[in-house]
Amino acid sequence: MNLNRLDLNLLIAFDALMTELSVSKAANKLFIGQSAMSHSLNRLRQTFDDPILVRTTGGMKPTARAKELIEPIRKALLEIEVAVGTPQTFEPKIAQQGFVIAASDYGELILLPSLLKRVRELAPGVKIQVRRPGEYLLEQELENGSLNAVISFDASMETSSRIRQQGLFHDFLVSVVREDHPLIVDSLTLEQYIELEHVLISPDGNNHDPGIIDQWLNKRKLSRNVVLYVSHFLSAPLIIAQTDLILTLPYRIAEKLAHMAALKLLRTPINLPSYQYSMNWHPLYEKDPAHQWLRAQIDTVSRQLANSPIPPQYLP
């Protein structure tokens, strides 16, 4: 049998015919005309190469072949009905599920505490795994489901147009020095910024690809002296607190790190646009209830951050 020629409606008609053992009653059951049901019966006979229903002195009777097909077809129709008729649901209070999110230590410091607090309150059985975004395979991992979401700055997320993206909040670059820095008091000039020795945070340790700061300086035939490259935000404040180095980083994380060490926040003397922090996911899971719930929680805690304005003295 060529399944490409098998119409699902024929199986529904078959089930009605086997239940009613009457073309007219089967037609009424499916709210179609008797001629349409007769046509379906003829197509069934052609499809299975069998009379299916035969008129006898006792009324219409199913053939032996039809009897063999009754249970398998009813089971198949039931499974289809369950599959397409019962929408997936996600019940946070009883869910026992794990989610995997890719985020840098920025995301861990800024979003994770509030996100985890909210998840634990709403879905105590849900587990969250956070890992660093790799350079490759992010889109593939989002597609195959081994990764549920990537939260990152737009500039660091290179994916195709197929990936869904939602902006969460913006951040601006500020500079930090130690509280008792011998040269910097309350403000920072461009000349001072260039003369100071810098720490640069580079997740992959790459010191060859200039970021937006160095691009801005290069356009003006200026440069800064980067003497230390580190791969994580967390080590930077302790280094800055014990040296005369300067570090430029997003305000929201600088404000948190300043509580870990005696640091002074300063407006960076470079007019740069804001960074947008975004959430990325694969369209295959756009309507998945569990994924929708996770994205809603990330969106909620992000909106709380977005509603906390950056002090104007740090804005460019």
Image (cartoon, helix red, strand yellow):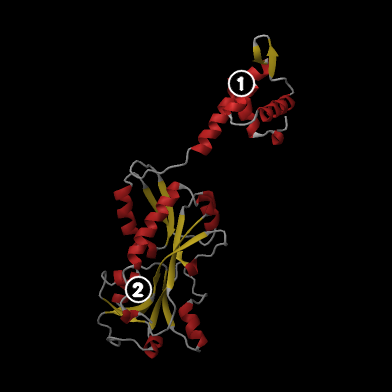
Quarter holding residue 139: bottom right
Q: Which residue is mark 1?
A: 18
Q: Position of residue 165 (x, y in %)?
A: 49, 61
Left or right of 17 on screen, residue 45: right
Q: Which mark is residue 251?
A: 2
Instruction: Quadrant for the N terminus, please.
Output: top right
Which SS class for mark 2? helix
Q: Position of residue 312 (x, y in %)?
A: 32, 80
Q: Position of residue 255 (x, y in %)?
A: 30, 72
Residue 226 seen: yes
Quarter holding residue 73: top right
Nearer to us in this view, 168 or 230 = 168
Task: Tell me the amino acid under the disc marked 2.
Answer: Tyr
Quarter holding residue 11: top right
142 to 56, vertically: above or below: below
Nearer to us in this view, 95 or 30 = 30
Left or right of 198 on screen, residue 136: right
